[in-house]
Amino acid sequence: MTGTNYAAYIREQTKTNSTTLSDARIVTLTNPIKDEMAGEVIKINEDYFGIFMYRNIVADQRNYAFPTDLLSQMKYIEAKLDGTEWEKLTEVEVQSKGIVTDETSIQSYFSSRKPSFEIFGGELIIYHGAAVINVTNGLKLWAIIYPADISTAMLAGTTDLSVAPSATSFGFPRQLHKLLADKVVITWKESQPKPIRLSREELLWPQRMQSAMEAISHMNLDRPHEATVPYNDGSDY
């Protein structure tokens, strides 16, 4: 669906207009549902919203915050710790190793071990046996991110909602557009002072969603939904 068709469909099903159900209200209802549906998609096909994100490695900095639109944990992490060669980082729990985490101790412990990482407090921590140096786009994150939020501008446009609004994001899968719109309709009907009776199709929404998930699970994984983009962590400013 295009943005205008999406809004028109919802208003037709709810017997409303742009005054009684504004674009802003549709967006408010849509985005939480969109995120919930995206979570169901990755349970079936974990790579569906996969994207390569590059960010700078900053000298003397081992901790890096995750992207704010991260849907689940990182799938894979690589780094050019020496500024030249890519290396896979292996996950480690330093607590189980019984080491302290000052810079000298980190370099000493990992001097004869493979470069590693740990996830703690919403951050990625890099461990290796040398000082951290500046490397432009030296950290490669295989990330699973949320599809972009739908905006009021999108609802006024003629671009299909499956089209990514930027090079660093995903659109929402076309095969789920009607399900998304129907769930918005259901939510709106149930939120009325006197809840409105659901149609038979709306009552069957969970079963329809399950069928859609089964279809997505059988997609050809030789055609990954991924992009290669830089991730700006603000270190250049």
Image (spheres, helix red, strand yellow):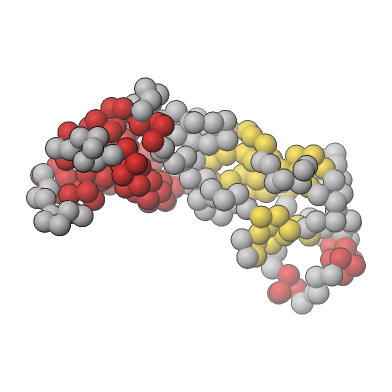
Query: Which corner quadrant of the image does residue 181 belong to?
Result: top left
In percent of width and height, residue 33 lies at 34, 48
Residue drawn at (38%, 46%) of the image: 31
Q: Is residue 194 left or right of residue 112?
A: left
In front: 146, or 166?
A: 166
In percent of width and height, residue 61 lies at 80, 56
Quadrant the C terminus occupies: top right
Q: Is residue 37 left or right of residue 124?
A: left
User: Is any part of residue 140 visible from this angle?
Assistant: no
User: Residue 160, relative to residue 60: is it above or below?
Assistant: above
Quadrant the N terminus occupies: top left
User: Residue 213, relative to residue 167: is it above or below?
Assistant: below
Residue drawn at (61%, 44%) of the image: 142
Q: Is residue 74 left or right of residue 133?
A: left
Give the tally of numbered discs: 0
**Which residue is at the far bottom?**
98
In percent of width and height, residue 196 lies at 11, 50
**Which residue is at the far top?**
158
**Which residue is at the far front?**
19
User: Is any part of residue 135 visible from this angle?
Assistant: yes
Q: Is residue 124 left or right of residue 51?
A: right
In front: 169, or 131?
A: 169
